[in-house]
Image (cartoon, rainbow, N blue to C red):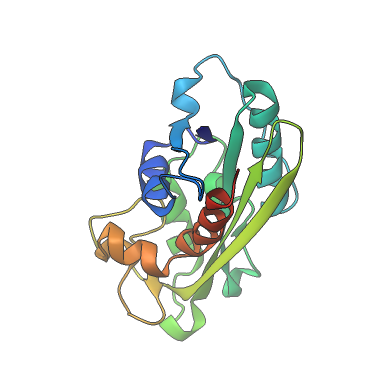
């Protein structure tokens, strides 16, 4: 059985797939593919008002168009000092065509002068698993932490070099992929997805 992970980001795809099972409880093999395997599929804009909206938009559309079970997620960084921003605009915080460095620089600029205890934040992930017939379920995960004062670590992507995990005081970029997956927002959401996939018959 093929499962489409509705992302074109190879970093995200390689982070998600180890979190998912290889077989259903009946022993059927699960094969994971990404949007890179569907180059002619044009995804709809992520214009939902919430993370759940965006995850559902992507999963339901791709499932209908490809005929595959589809897994999608949307992740937001919520910074308390910024009243929850960037939130649903996390990936495009510095503009529609901004890259990760642009987003990180904007975030650091907006928090300039604040002590660490004022830089509390959390990552939230909502994952959606949709069937071609439109039925779907959503799952959530949260990771609490702080926004640091500069880049730390070489791993991960996006805001990972800035996000200091509350329980470890390491940034996500200072962790190995295995360490990150054990505690991360995405790891939490996708562990619930894994249980759902294993129960497929």
Which of the two residues, 4 or 163, is positioned nearer the viewer here? 4
Residue 185 pos. (x, y %)? 49, 64
50 sits left or right of 91 in the view: right
* Residue found at x 37% / y 49%: 15
Front residue (pair 159, 34): 34
- The residue drawn where x is 37% and y is 67% is 182
Q: Pinpoint residue 160: horizontal percent, then vertical percent.
A: 37, 59
Asked whether, in this view, residue 11 is left or right of residue 76, the answer is left
* Residue sitting at the far bottom: 117
Q: Residue furthest front?
A: 26
Q: Farthest residue in the top direction?
A: 40
Give coordinates of residue 144: x percent, y percent: 49, 75
> Seen in the image, is 140 located left or right of residue 19?
right
Position of residue 45 measured from the top left corner of the image (x, y, whole percent): 67, 32
Count of residue discs: 0
Left/right of residue 108 with respect to residue 83 in the rendered view: left
Quarter residue 142 falls in? bottom right
Residue 163 in sight in this render: no
Nearest the viewer among 156 and 81 is 156
Q: Residue at x 38, y 82 (%)?
A: 167
């Amino acid at each position: 059985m093929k499962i489409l992970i509705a992302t074109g980001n190879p970093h995200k795809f390689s982070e998600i797939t180890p979190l998912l099972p290889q077989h259903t409880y009946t022993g059927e093999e699960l094969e994971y593919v990404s949007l890179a395997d569907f180059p002619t599929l044009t995804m709809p804009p992520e214009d939902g008002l919430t993370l759940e909206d965006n995850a559902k938009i992507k999963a339901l559309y791709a499932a209908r168009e490809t005929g595959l079970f589809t897994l999608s997620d949307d992740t937001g960084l919520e910074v308390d000092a910024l009243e929850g921003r960037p939130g649903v605009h996390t990936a495009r915080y510095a503009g529609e065509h901004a890259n990760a460095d642009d987003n990180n620089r904007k975030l650091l600029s907006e928090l300039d002068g604040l002590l660490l205890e004022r830089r509390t934040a959390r990552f939230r992930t909502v994952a959606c698993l949709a069937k071609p017939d439109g039925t779907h379920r959503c799952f959530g995960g949260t990771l609490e932490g702080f926004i640091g004062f500069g880049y730390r670590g070489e791993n991960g992507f996006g805001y990972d070099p800035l996000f200091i995990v509350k329980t470890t005081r390491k940034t996500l970029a200072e962790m190995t992929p295995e360490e990150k997956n054990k505690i991360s927002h995405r790891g939490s959401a996708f562990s619930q997805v894994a249980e759902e996939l294993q129960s497929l018959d």
